[in-house]
Image (spheres, helix red, strand yellow):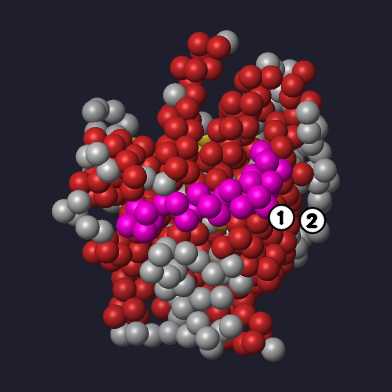
Amino acid sequence: MLDTYFKITERGSTVGREIRGGFVTFFTMAYIVALNPLIIGLAKDADGKYLGGGDAPNLAMVAAATALIAGVLTILMGVVGNYPLALATGLGLNTFVAVGIASHMSWADAMGLVVLEGLIITVLVLTGFRTAVFRAVPAQLKIAISVGIGLFIALIGLVDAGFVRRTSSGPVPVTLGDNGNLVGWPIVIFALGLFLMIALMVKKVKGALLIGISVATVAAIAVESAFKIGPNFIAPDKVNPKGWGLNVPSIPSDVIATPDFGLLGHFSLFGSFSRISVVAAILIVFTLLLSDFFDTVGTVTAIGHESGLIDSKGNIPNNDRILLVDSLAAVAGGAGSISSNTSYIESASGVGEGARTGLASVVTGVLFLLTTFLAPLVAVIPYEAATPALVIVGFLMMTQIKGIDWADYGIAIPAFLTIILMPFTYNISVGIGAGFVSHVVIRMVQGRRKEIHPLLMLVSGLFMIYFLASPINTWIG
């Protein structure tokens, strides 16, 4: 039954691979359950209230809602979209909601704008517009998007592990470790996990990424128990450069915790219009929409290339269903008061483990649902044990670069901008937008306007508005 429904054999996979892939994807993105509360749970709205309406942070409630929405939507992606793609609160989007939106209104009003954006993007899917845009993008630009995301997630892995960090001073923005030096046991754990995964992959051992994460986690627990390293972040003005990035690995005293889903439904759909101008609200929704729209296009494309599910024209099976579930995830994220949910590029780690169908997503989703009760177990896995998988997957996605025609400047320059700007700006949409706009401009300069799809011209114009949103807002305001 599983094989027939999910087309496991047809896609060259097995049930075992799908289960392993689902576990690996979960382990590489489970950090969001702990990180999202620290981003939106510690921020106050314009009324001085924390998410949930209290005078004190409600981190447990944010964590429970984050895991619940991620679990339900990821299972829905697996069952409806049959695609090895997991969803959760979007990083970057949650920061924008906390800093750029909630600071000007109540949390309920801010989440109402997220729901509104999700409803609009759902309509775009149902009308076929989102799918049409997806197909209007040249195949080689889709490859560039995939390669750029590969570099992006590799950088995410290196930064989260502390291998690459911001410099304390000087013109250079990032450096190796702590001011040019690799320090602390967590880096050793990262290196252990990375080289173990590489060795297992070279030997073609099944479950290489999952084994690497598991072994590194056990080693991390042993190291923390022996040396009492503690967290990297101690206070806003105090940092331990030798500490763990997010979770401090230790054997939990409690395994089960009762979740509190009190945040669900705390949103006001049009409440923001009484707090800020209609134009400002529209620009906020537009910014959310464009970022969500093309982050997903990039992620879905990258997963399609990496899994071999994309055809010669760059199309993906069940594309409409995949985009529909992703759109509903934005609505669910706002309705659950935990910011817009979107597709996670970390899903590529599960694909790297062999996942090719929605069964892997079902496994990941079930694990997220269990996390609402088993939050103490999730806290065991530190960044340094999970992030080596992102570096490995970044390498795998980078290999697709050979499919780009570097002799055609109309493709090569946009591809180059797409690839470098994703990691350099820490934003998938920026890379996609730069690639689209430059492609349109170069083709017009070359006198090859007929080769530009009308929808691509429209989207490029929208991206120009996106890039100029701040001066436009200042001019209007």
| Residue at 51 percent of width and 31 percent of height | 236
Identified by mark 1, the residue type is Ile
Nearer-the-camera pick, 221 or 297: 297
| Residue at 42 percent of width and 39 percent of height | 457
**Residue wearing tag 1:** 69
Mark 2: secondary structure: loop
Magenta residues, as a range? 117-142
Is residue 271 covered in magenta? no
Percent coordinates x, y for residue 412 in the rendering: 23, 49
**Extreme residue toward the front, this view:** 450
**Residue wearing tag 2:** 259
Tell me the quarter of the picture where residue 395 sits.
bottom left
Sequence order check: which comes first, mark 1 or mark 2?
1
Label 1 crowd (10 A; few <14 / some 14-19 / many >=20)? many
Percent coordinates x, y for residue 441 in the rendering: 30, 35
Tell me the quarter of the picture where residue 307 sits.
bottom left
Relative placement, left or right, of 194 versus 365 is left
